Image (cartoon, rainbow, N blue to C red):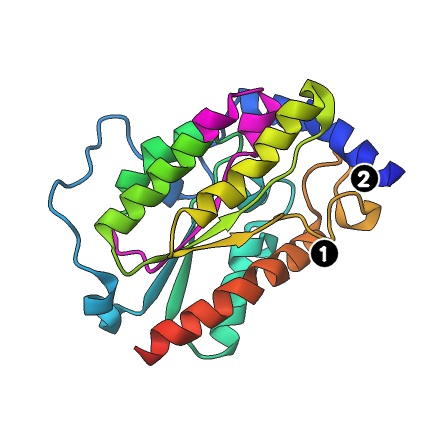
């Protein structure tokens, strides 16, 4: 328990610094030019474009971006390896940006949806909590991202990856923040909740980098395993259709 508490305390300092400067250079998919406007025409439903394979979009922060590890070691790349090992025609696109908030993700989602999306892995909110943003705002932004995705692609599925924060801003704020993710997931039939993206990773020294917040390569393998437990059956069902 003491190790987990140390992790959570370090989380405040490190992610606070990370959040001050967003690095949008990790992939072209994460960079929407400021003057770029998403197409006003609705992309075709992914079920009608199965010849192009399935597309999994990972919209997240520095964890998805793979801060401190190589791109091939970050959990989105490991998900792609799992897909490839089964011989499935599916592409995992990493749109993670270090320091990203739910507001930033909501601004980017329209641009990212120009290509069809079958599954959205939504890994955002941790930086909101560390900045003390009203949980109601975080909830609204997460729902805005999901609503935009499901309006554009009604047959898409969403994996909502939950995050936990330390109690530095008070027990009540921590409680309200933790409730955001299950409340959002419960509002949709097509959203599956991953309660904690760093399950079995947070607080384990061998799985966390020296900054106490970002997973090591070994930690990312466990994160990928956690996500894959939910993602694999979704992709398997989509392939049968």
Q: Earlier in the sequence, mark 2 or mark 1?
A: 2
Classed neighbour count for the residue bearing mark 2: other residues with Cα under 10 Å, few (<14), some (14–19), many (≥20): some
65 shown above or below 228: above
Q: Is residue 112 visible?
A: no
- Residue at 46% across, 48% down: 185
Image quadrant for the C terminus?
bottom left
Q: Alpha-carbon distance for marks 2 and 1?
A: 18 Å
- Residue at 51% across, 21% down: 134
Instruction: Answer left or right for 26 relative to 75.
Output: left
191 shown above or below 33: below
The answer to whether residue 135 is magenta is yes
Q: Which residues are magenta?
A: 114-138
In the rendered image, which quarter is residue 91 located in? bottom left
Q: Is residue 116 visible?
A: yes
Image quadrant for the N terminus?
top right
Q: How far across and how far down the image is residue 55, in percent?
A: 35, 61
- Residue at 29% across, 50% down: 150
- Residue at 40% across, 31% down: 140
């Amino acid at each position: 328990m003491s190790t987990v508490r140390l992790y959570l305390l370090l989380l405040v300092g490190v992610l606070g610094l990370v959040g001050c400067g967003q690095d949008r250079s990790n992939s072209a998919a994460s960079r929407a030019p400021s003057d770029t406007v998403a197409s006003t025409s609705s992309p075709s439903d992914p079920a009608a474009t199965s010849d192009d394979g399935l597309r999994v979009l990972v919209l997240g922060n520095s964890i998805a971006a793979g801060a401190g590890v190589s791109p091939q070691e970050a959990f989105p790349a490991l998900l792609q390896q799992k897909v490839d090992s089964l011989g499935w025609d599916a592409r995992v696109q990493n749109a993670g940006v270090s320091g990203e908030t739910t507001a930033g993700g909501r601004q980017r989602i329209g641009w990212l949806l120009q290509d069809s999306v079958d599954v959205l892995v939504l890994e955002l909110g941790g930086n909101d909590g560390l900045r003390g943003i009203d949980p109601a705002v975080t909830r609204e932004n997460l729902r805005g991202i999901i609503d935009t995705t499901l309006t554009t692609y009604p047959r898409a599925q969403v994996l909502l990856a939950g995050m936990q924060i330390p109690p530095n801003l008070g027990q009540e704020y921590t409680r309200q923040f933790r409730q955001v993710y299950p409340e959002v997931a419960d509002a949709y039939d097509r959203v599956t909740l991953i309660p904690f993206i760093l399950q079995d990773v947070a607080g384990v020294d061998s799985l966390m980098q020296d900054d106490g917040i970002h997973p090591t390569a070994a930690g990312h393998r466990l994160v990928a395993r956690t996500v894959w437990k939910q993602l694999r059956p979704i992709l398997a069902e989509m392939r049968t259709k």
